[in-house]
Image (cartoon, helix red, strand yellow):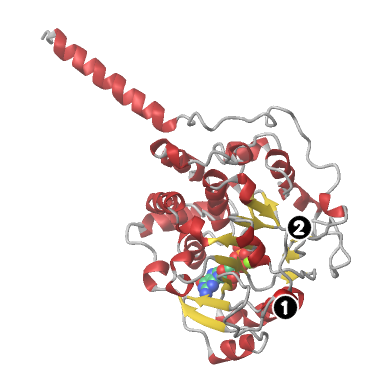
Amino acid sequence: MAVARPIRMLGASCIILVLFLIFQMNKTPTFISKGPYATQPYEGITSDPLKEPTGEPTGHLWRATDGDYSPDSTDSPRAPAALISLVRNEELNELIPSMRDLERTWNSKFNYPWIFFNDVPFTEEFKKRTQAETKAKCYYELVPKEHWDVPEWINWDLFKESAQILKEKNIQYSDKVSYHQMCRWNSGLFYKHPALAKYRYYWRVEPKVKFFCDVDYDIFRYVADYNITYGFTINLFDAPESIPSLWPETKKFLAANPSYVSDNNMMNWLTDDQLRPEHTEGGNGYSTCHFWSNFEIGDMEFFRGEQYSAYFDHLDRSGGFFYERWGDAPVHSIGVGLFADAAKVHWFRDIGYNHIPYYNCPNSPKCSGCTPGKMYAGESWLAKEDCRPSYFHHVGTH
Ligand SMILES: Nc1nc2c(ncn2[C@@H]2O[C@H](COP(=O)(O)OP(=O)(O)OP(=O)(O)O)[C@@H](O)[C@H]2O)c(=O)[nH]1
Ligand SMILES: [Mg+2]
């Protein structure tokens, strides 16, 4: 039967339109361009910048003697900030030395409050022993059920099946539901906790981490005064198998919201395909290089803002926190890399830090207990997980 010409034309137009839309959804948005440096080959860092003498950042710094930093002072120069830690009761013995390190090297001078979060109530022993480590006030908070529970749109059968597949690929903790819940909470929910409403800046602390260097200025005040969005110590590659659809989902989000991307974004770093091309391939366009988020100092106004909130909601709805094992480190890093101003991201090179097995160890008389410029402890293959060369190349060492 012959079909009238206008109907044929209409049909053809519809097909072309659908194909065009599919193409638009999948193509790399035009602003994902390679910058001037990305076309030049680089081979990593020949000498670790941490071997060079490292001092304090330049600019005005607030010292403990510049104001009343006593814990209860209502007139202190402190920024609206807190040390925060999601932790289990069972990790108390591992948390205490980390708290002790940070108090000794920094917080005993500035007395910022500690806020502990848990999905179950803290024990009296936990409260007593942590409060005994600091003059500053400690708070103990329960994560609201609606922030911790697995969302109702997650299909359990699909979760179990996917977890099994990831387990066979040696993705650590992939079949542990609480690990997925923790990553999701850290990615997009911690800053919505009512106990943090009055604070703008946070410093995340985990049990078992170490701090090696005396820091004699008010870090939060520095972050506030210089309008820093995000601060990190270590840059690492992730396992591409844990996040195969994270970048494709990100591209879908960007195609629908191109105006959200910062003018001074870090796209070249996120999409670097020179340092470890097979990782960028496995990450479907994302190099997997991320800020190692067990240490982070950040501005919650950024995370609470329209761009990052919409991005997290998009990712959350896609189910990847459960069907894959998206960590809060790559999610925060992509969010910061896309929506923040690269000039407002700061490498805290002067904070000596360790979470097994990696280090940020500066060369400074203020540090002890780590080796300057030694990035890892253990097998030599750990060295290839270091992606700081890509960050320094594309973004810088500020
Ligand atoms: N309250 C609570 N805290 C958790 C839970 N799972 C993880 N955490 C905390 O979340 C942070 C990250 O968890 P880790 O188990 O250290 O994850 P990771 O750093 O990827 O793994 P490791 O290399 O083993 O340290 C730590 O501060 C934990 O104490 C949980 O189910 N409940
Ligand atoms: Mg840990």
Q: Secondary structure at mark 1?
A: helix
Residue with the mark numbered 1? 109
Q: Position of residue 141 (x, y in %)?
A: 48, 79
Frontmost residue, 393 versus 171 = 393
Q: Is residue 164 visible?
A: yes
Q: Secondary structure at mark 2?
A: loop
Q: Is residue 49 above or below residue 352?
A: above
Q: Is residue 238 visible?
A: no
Residue under the point 58% across and 84% down = 137
Q: Is residue 71 above or below residue 343?
A: below
Q: Amino acid at mark 2?
A: Pro
Quadrant field for ligand 1: bottom right
Cβ atoms at labels 2 and 1 below 8 Å apart: no
Q: Is residue 210 above or below residue 120?
A: above
Sequence-wise, the earlier of marks 2 and 1 is 2
Residue with the mark numbered 2? 57
